[in-house]
């Protein structure tokens, strides 16, 4: 089977992820009418990601990543379907936690396996294609979920969502590729204590690896702050959609994210053509695009004019795709024996950043307006990137002088 199908399967699975984001968030907000409950819903999903990211990287380095992906798709489909029958706030929280848990397993195994399938020399091009397909899924998923939820109700959206996961699992089941598990450390320990010690040693190894790679460490710092800032616009977009038109909230919610996704698609077409992105330029481009992304979010949250919001959402999507693709490329350049754990750490940082952000955002929202809350969060990311750029530039000049 053509290996590129693997990429399209992930994109199809992403379609379901984006659809359930719209349906579940709108369902909770309609049920409670509270931005605090909405933030808590997102935080609980993130908490599941935090928990699983502590050991998802270890499992991705020890076991067959393909099988991990298949089973997590099946579990996510079953979990989503429970909301069709039990659409109450408590069940929504349980579902969000479990979705966050299993999505982290899938994401880490998937990302760690890319270089093995397509080659280390084609990582940037492959990541650009992945980002393009993900963005297309985002456009279809968000706009589709917004329209379907607005017209037919959340139940149909959730059923379609579950079907995408089932189809993804079936296609992955039919595919075969060399997973290269033979060069990973085998899971031969016995007993809970021995297993915990072994996991601890694995995590110690990956943190040591990151600490001796200064630029990798800086990229992860920016990624952590970026996840924290991301909580503000993830919470803010459904509220912005309601402020634009409370009667069509789900439609505008999906539309804003959909136009953002169109910008992401354009970015993934441009990115592979930028041949100068290698070495330290890869890192600096990551920091600069993160700043431009934050500037875009700050700008479109400052208006209630739909056309202004959509225009800047489009440009924000371009720079967001650049940032996330470059970050994934940096991580995928690490050694295969440790790559799963490196992505596990990345997922942990993302989850922790989101969790902290979703805790702080409702508090700030009580004291500030929505635009000012987003400014505070994304302003933090811009300042962090500036500090990192100044620090790394100073270190580079110091090395040149010593030479």
Image (cartoon, rainbow, N blue to C red):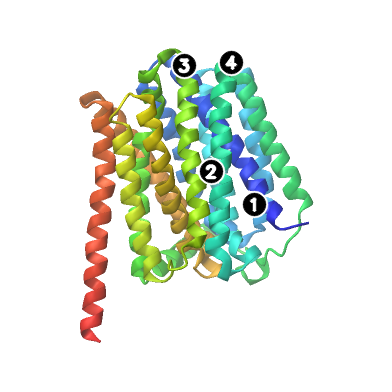
Q: Which quadrant, please, contains the C terminus?
A: bottom left
Q: Position of residue 291 (x, y in %)?
A: 31, 50
Residue at numbered disc 4: 151
Q: Residue at x 47, y 33 (%)?
A: 257
In the foreground, 294 or 19: 294
Mark 1 neighbour density, 10 Å: few (under 14) some (14–19) many (20 or more): some
Of pointers 4 and 1, the one earlier in the residue sequence? 1
Query: Which residue ends up furthest to the bottom in the rendered image?
Result: 403
Whether 290 is drawn above or below 42: the answer is below
Q: Secondary structure at mark 1?
A: helix
In the foreground, 342 or 10: 10
3D distance between C-alphas at marks 1 and 2: 13 Å
Residue at numbered disc 2: 135
3D distance between C-alphas at marks 4 and 1: 31 Å
Residue at numbered disc 1: 7
Q: Secondary structure at mark 2?
A: helix
Mark 3 neighbour density, 10 Å: few (under 14) some (14–19) many (20 or more): some
Displayed quadrant of residue 364: top left
Q: Which quadrant, please, contains the N terminus?
A: bottom right
Q: Residue at x 50, y 22 (%)?
A: 251
Residue at numbered disc 3: 248
Left/right placement of residue 19 relative to residue 395 reads right
Left/right placement of residue 363 relative to residue 35 reads left
Q: Are marks 4 and 3 in contact (CB under 8 Å)?
A: no
3D distance between C-alphas at marks 1 and 3: 34 Å
Tell which tag, 1 or 2, sits nearer the viewer. Answer: 2
């Amino acid at each position: 089977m053509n290996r590129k199908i693997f990429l399209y399967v992930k994109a199809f699975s992403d379609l379901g992820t984006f659809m359930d984001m719209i349906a579940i968030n709108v369902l909770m907000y309609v049920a409670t009418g509270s931005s605090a409950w909405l933030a808590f819903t997102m935080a609980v999903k993130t908490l599941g990601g935090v928990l699983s990211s502590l050991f998802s990287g270890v499992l991705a380095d020890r076991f067959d990543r393909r099988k991990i992906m298949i089973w997590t798709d099946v579990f996510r489909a079953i979990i989503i379907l429970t909301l069709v029958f039990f659409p109450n706030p408590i069940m929504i929280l349980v579902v969000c936690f479990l979705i966050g848990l299993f999505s982290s397993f899938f994401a880490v195994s998937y990302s760690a396996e890319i270089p093995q399938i397509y080659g280390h020399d084609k990582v940037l091009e492959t990541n650009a294609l992945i980002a393009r397909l993900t963005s297309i899924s985002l456009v279809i998923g968000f706009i589709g979920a917004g329209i379907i939820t607005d017209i037919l109700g959340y139940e149909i959206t959730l059923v379609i969502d579950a079907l995408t996961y089932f189809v993804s699992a079936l296609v992955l089941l039919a595919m075969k590729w060399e997973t290269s598990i033979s060069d990973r450390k085998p899971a031969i320990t016995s007993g809970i204590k021995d297993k915990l010690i072994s996991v601890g040693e694995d995590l110690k190894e990956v943190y040591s690896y990151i600490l001796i790679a200064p630029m990798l460490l800086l990229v992860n710092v920016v990624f952590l702050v970026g996840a924290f800032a991301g909580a503000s616009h993830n919470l803010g977009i459904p509220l912005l959609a309601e402020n634009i038109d409370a009667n069509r909230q789900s439609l505008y919610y999906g539309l804003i994210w959909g136009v953002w996704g169109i910008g992401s698609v354009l970015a993934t077409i441009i990115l592979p053509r930028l041949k100068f992105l290698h070495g330290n330029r890869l890192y600096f481009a990551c920091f600069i695009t993160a700043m431009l992304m934050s500037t875009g979010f700050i700008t479109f949250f400052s208006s209630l004019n739909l056309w202004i919001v959509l225009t800047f959402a489009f440009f924000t999507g371009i720079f967001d795709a650049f940032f996330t693709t470059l970050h994934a490329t940096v991580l995928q350049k690490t050694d295969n024996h440790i790559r799963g754990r490196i992505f596990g750490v990345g997922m942990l940082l993302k989850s922790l950043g989101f969790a902290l952000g979703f805790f702080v955002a409702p508090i700030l929202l009580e004291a500030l307006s929505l635009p000012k809350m987003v400014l505070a969060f994304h302003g933090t990311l811009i300042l962090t990137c500036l500090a990192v750029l100044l620090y790394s530039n100073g270190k580079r000049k110091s090395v040149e002088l010593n030479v």
